[in-house]
């Protein structure tokens, strides 16, 4: 397993409910500007923008300038890493249980 | 569910299995080097120097010999490990659940219906495999 900085960010990024909501909103559209995302939240556009920046750091969101506004788009690929860890631990515990069996039944 | 759920069985009495789950020296033999103690609220670490994995843990439930639960925070993974034990005859059934792999986030993707022309394959993979 690699443990790059970016991997860490993916888990931090999806740990927050507001950011999960942003992911949901972006999953339902091809691309959205900030002013269409902000009304879904109690917080202001600056706060929403900060959450988007964290998602962007984790490579879960990409953005591009269109005229005066910035449009955001979801990139689901890094979520694969969550699945990788699940598979990792499935293998880990199955292997450990064999060791445990040897200890218990020797 | 993206959570992990595994079942094991041992031809061994429940007390012996419980001891293997809670004794630090025994845990070191089958899980990892550790300073674990079965005391609720106790904070400890599991370490595997070979692969550079350090897991921070806090004991949550100690219900001897039925249930043991602790947090399992290693690298980017923030999960809870829960062991449930049950003896029937000479067999002890051990159930493991490791929860907190953020499955909620994956369910969010089930709502995605359009706008995916160029990412659809990745999306499908994420939804189907998790």
Image: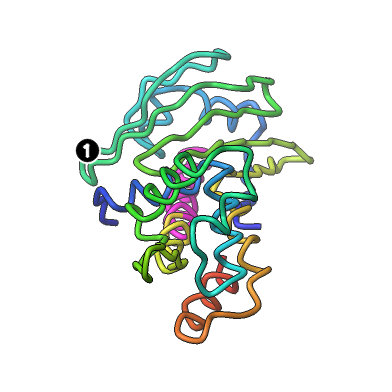
Where does the image place residue A73, in percent across and percent down from the top left? 45, 68
Vertically, is A57 above or below B50? below
Query: Which region shows up in magenta?
Result: A86-106
What's the residue at 37%, 49% (across, down)?
A53
Residue sitting farthest toward the front: A68
For label 1, the residue is B49
Majority secondary structure in the magenta region: helix
Residue B34 occupies quadrant: top left
Is residue B6 in view? no
Say if the magenta span includes residue B112: no
Residue A2 occupies quadrant: bottom left
Q: Nearer the viewer, residue A102 or B71?
A: B71
Q: Nearer the viewer, residue B6 or B78?
A: B78
Where does the image place residue B129, in percent across and percent down from the top left? 55, 71
Vertically, is A63 above or below A98? below
Q: Residues within 10 Å of mark 1 (few under 14, many from 20)?
A: few
Q: Quadrant of the N terminus of chain B?
A: bottom right
Q: Nearer the viewer, residue B119 or A84?
A: B119
What's the residue at 38%, 47% (across, down)?
A54
Q: Nearer the viewer, residue A66 or B106?
A: A66
Where does the image place residue A99, in percent across and percent down from the top left? 43, 46
What's the residue at 49%, 62% (across, down)?
A33
Chain for disc number 1: B
Assign a secondary structure to mark 1.
loop
Vertically, is A70 above or below A21? below
């Amino acid at each position: 397993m690699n443990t790059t900085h970016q991997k860490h960010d993916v888990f931090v990024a999806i740990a927050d409910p507001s950011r999960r909501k942003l992911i949901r909103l972006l999953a339902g559209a091809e691309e959205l500007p900030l002013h269409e995302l902000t009304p879904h939240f109690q917080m202001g556009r600056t706060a929403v923008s900060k959450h988007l920046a964290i998602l962007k750091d984790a490579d879960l969101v990409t953005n591009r300038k269109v005229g005066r506004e910035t449009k955001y788009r979801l990139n689901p690929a890094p979520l694969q890493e969550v699945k990788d860890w699940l598979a990792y631990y499935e293998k880990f515990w199955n292997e450990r249980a064999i060791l445990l069996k040897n200890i218990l039944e020797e | 569910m993206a959570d992990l759920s595994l079942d094991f069985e041992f031809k061994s009495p429940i007390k012996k299995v419980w001891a293997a789950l809670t004794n630090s020296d025994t845990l070191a033999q089958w899980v990892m080097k550790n300073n674990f103690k079965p005391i609720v609220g106790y904070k400890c670490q599991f370490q595997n120097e070979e692969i550079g994995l350090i897991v921070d843990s806090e004991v949550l439930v100690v219900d001897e010999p039925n249930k043991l639960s602790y947090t399992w925070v290693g690298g980017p993974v923030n999960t809870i490990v829960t062991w449930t034990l049950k003896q029937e005859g000479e067999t002890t059934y051990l159930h493991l659940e490791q929860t907190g792999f953020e499955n909620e986030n994956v369910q969010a993707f089930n709502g995605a219906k359009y706008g995916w022309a160029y990412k659809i394959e990745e999306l499908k993979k994420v939804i189907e495999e998790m």
